[in-house]
Image (cartoon, grey):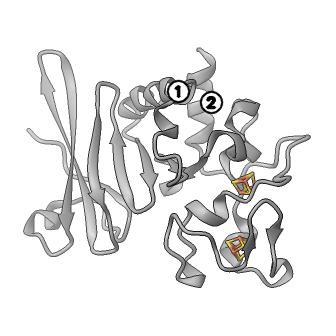
Amino acid sequence: MCAGERMSAELMTSDPNPIVSGRSCGTCTLCCKVLKIWELDKPPGVWCRHCKPGSGCMIYSGRPQECRTFHCGYLTNPDLGEEWKPSHSKIVVVPDMEGKRIAVHVDVQRPDAWKREPYYSNLKRWAALAGVQRGQVVAYVGGRMYMIFPDRDVDLGMVGEGDWIMMDERMTSAGIKFEAHKLHKDDPRAQDLDAQQSGQEVLRSKPTE
Ligand code: SF4
Ligand code: SF4
């Protein structure tokens, strides 16, 4: 098994991983920009009002619980090399949906960061493995979402709390082909979804016949 496959498998576990020895946030504060912080009603892609970029959290002892428990993939996965440090890559890797999804949250000021190497090749390799495991690999640039498949990327546009993402799969002569569609949660097609989650969650429909 190549390093990418091993790394992907580890990223897709839901176990809280310990922080890799020798790693720390240092001067990185990128998660305080790229992530939505629910407890602060902070949208993705803008700096948290409590962050001093390059320095840290100004309310550290009183920061929200979701900030206390968050550790990005760089901190927790030893198979992610130093090139993945968010302050360098401009990408924050986050295992999501109980390990079924790998999300990369990209700095809006470097929106193409996920398409640069060595990142893009890794994302494609993880996407191939995710297809086998019925998982997903997605990139967020601000509120914009891209579904990453081995053969292409699907721009789903801005995805809000009222939107669901429906996944379809069908067998073709070349193998299983996956599709992703954005639906408003009131769309009747959303009723067929077999995973009932809302917000910026990726949902999978029943496989097509
Ligand atoms: S993105 Fe990762 S390394 Fe950077 S501040 Fe957040 S948790 Fe630390
Ligand atoms: S409260 Fe602190 S740790 Fe949480 S996002 Fe804001 S600056 Fe970062």
Q: Is residue 75 above or below residue 33?
A: above
Q: Of the numbered discs in the image, which one, if any, rests on residue 7?
A: 2
If the picture is divided into quarters, which one holds ligand 1? bottom right
The x, y position of residue 68, in whole percent, is 75, 71
Q: Is residue 173 above or below residue 143?
A: above
Neighbours of disc 2 within 10 Å: few (<14), some (14-19), many (20+): some
Q: To which quarter of the image does residue 81 belong?
A: top right
- Give the camera-side residue of 58 and 9: 58
Query: Label 1: which residue?
Result: 122
The x, y position of residue 50, in whole percent, is 72, 79
Give the SS element for disc 1: helix
Q: Nearer the viewer, mark 1 or mark 2?
A: 1
Work out how far the residue at label 1 is from the one at label 2, CA to CA, in angstroms.
10 Å
* Dot 1 and dot 2 residues touching (CB under 8 Å): yes
The answer as to whether callout 1 falls within 8 Å of ligand 1 is no
How many marks are shown on the rendered structure? 2
Residue kind at label 1, given as amino acid type? Asn
The x, y position of residue 136, in whole percent, is 40, 43
Q: Is residue 199 above or below residue 73?
A: below
Give the SS element for disc 2: helix
Q: To which quarter of the image does residue 185 belong?
A: bottom left
